[in-house]
Image (cartoon, rainbow, N blue to C red):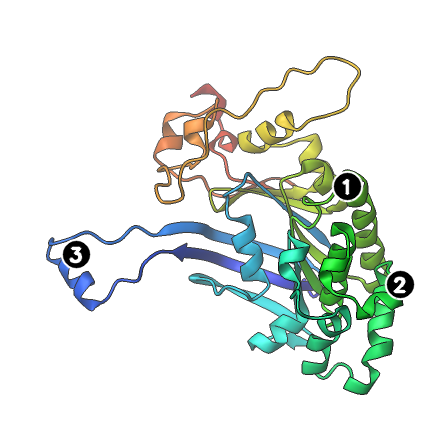
């Protein structure tokens, strides 16, 4: 485990109005009720190794973007902890975490300051962290632009003067400026045209090989994750329900939710395909079902699924799943 550069241990995140002393006292005396809090991420434990791509997949609203922001140090966890390796030790302050973990967002235009030129966007963080002298920023920016497939002359332009694909390349260059070990990619290609998506994915692969980068690649596009990821984690209502090597997960999905996602993914096939959309809608994170949160939509739900939350168990080498169907004799219930 010496090559583990990122570890989330029991990470949870709740959002909601704070409750003061008087409010808690009123609840204790039965004079009121505690305000509802949204459980965006719930008891997530994941690791990422140097040079590894971990895909994080789930429906919109499942909490994967929130977890990505926690991983990048943008949001603090409500419970649990995140450990990031920096050099020979563990990063113990926000400054060091932000150098080691960078993030590429879904909307490249929204993530770039429209009032700053490209050279300012790419050099600001590196100068602040002492990675480059201000007098050397011209060459530094030129090298970053070349690494992401853009001409060095673009340094004097503003974000609005670029296409969406070019802006995303600039956002990637900005992430690389701090020489991170891990890059969190939050739907980093979903806003791009299909042809541009392929180019940016190939750029991610090239940078990974060149810099030995690790990625937390957040996406709802299973085809993209299958192409890029070494391991895949499936998230539902803030919980990770299955983790496995990418090849094993797509060949032998264990959890009913994973199987439903893969069955529902569009494919190019010569024969007619009958799509079976996942039954129902994902419940609100304000009112998470008891037991297994997927049981209201699961075609194989049993009585125990409504009462007991399943533990994550190893169903194969490196393949973990949280489902009561993995219990001995479950199929006979």
Mark 1: give few (<14), some (14-19) or many (20+) Cα within 10 Å: few
Q: Which residue is drawn at 76% across and 13% down?
A: 271
Q: Which label is found at residue 151?
A: 2
- Residue 64 percent coordinates (x, y): 55, 49
Mark 3, Cα crowd under 10 Å, few <14 / some 14-19 / many 20+, is: few
Image location (x, y in percent) of residue 264: 62, 26
> Which residue, given by chain and number where applicable, does mark 3 sit on?
27
For the residues labelled 1 and 2, the Cα–Cα distance comes to: 28 Å
User: Which of labels 2 and 3 is toward the front?
Assistant: 2
Indicate which disc, 1 or 2, sits on the residue closer to the N terminus. Answer: 2
Q: Residue 181 carries which label?
A: none
Any part of residue 256 in sight: yes
* 99 vs 309: above or below: below
Examine the rendering and report whether any part of residue 51 can be seen. no
Select label 1 or label 2 by which is in front. Answer: 2
In this figure, which residue is indicated by the disc labeled 1?
227
Q: Quadrant for the N terminus, please.
A: bottom right
- How many angstroms separate mark 1 from mark 3 (CA)? 51 Å
Q: Of 321 and 99, which appears nearest the observer?
A: 99
Residue 243 vertical placement versus 323 (above, below): below
Q: Is residue 93 above or below residue 227?
A: below
Q: How far across and down, in percent of the image, does residue 32 sit?
A: 15, 53
Upstream in the sequence, badge 2 or badge 3? Answer: 3
């Amino acid at each position: 485990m010496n090559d583990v550069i990122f570890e989330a241990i029991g990470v949870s995140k709740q959002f909601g109005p704070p409750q003061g002393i008087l409010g808690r006292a009123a609840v204790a005396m039965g004079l009121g009720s505690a305000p509802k809090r949204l459980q965006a991420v719930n008891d997530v434990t994941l690791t990422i190794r140097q040079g590894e791509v971990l895909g994080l997949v789930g429906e919109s609203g499942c909490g994967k973007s929130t977890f990505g922001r926690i991983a990048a140090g943008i949001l603090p966890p409500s419970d649990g902890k995140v450990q990031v390796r920096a050099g020979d030790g563990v990063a113990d302050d926000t400054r060091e975490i932000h150098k080691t973990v960078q993030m590429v967002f879904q909307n490249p235009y929204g993530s770039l300051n429209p009032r700053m030129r490209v050279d300012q966007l790419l050099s600001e963080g590196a100068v602040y962290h002492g990675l480059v002298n201000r007098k050397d920023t011209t060459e530094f920016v030129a090298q970053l632009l070349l690494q992401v497939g853009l001409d060095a002359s673009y340094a004097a332009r503003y974000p609005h003067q670029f296409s969406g694909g070019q802006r995303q390349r600039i956002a990637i260059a900005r992430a690389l400026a701090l020489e991170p070990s891990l890059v969190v990619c939050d739907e980093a290609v979903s806003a791009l045209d299909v042809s541009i998506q392929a180019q940016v994915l190939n750029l991610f692969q090239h940078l990974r090989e060149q810099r030995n980068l690790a990625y937390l690649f957040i996406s709802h596009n299973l085809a993209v994750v299958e192409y890029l990821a070494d391991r895949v984690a499936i998230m539902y209502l803030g919980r990770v329900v299955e983790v496995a090597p990418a090849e094993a997960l797509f060949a032998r999905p264990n959890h009913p939710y994973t199987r439903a996602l893969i069955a529902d993914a569009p494919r190019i096939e010569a024969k007619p395909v009958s799509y079976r959309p996942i039954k129902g809608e994902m419940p609100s994170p304000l009112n998470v079902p008891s037991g297994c949160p997927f049981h209201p939509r699961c075609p194989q739900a049993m009585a125990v699924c409504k009462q007991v939350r399943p533990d994550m168990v190893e169903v194969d080498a490196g393949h973990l799943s949280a489902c009561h169907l993995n219990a001995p004799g479950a199929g006979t219930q």
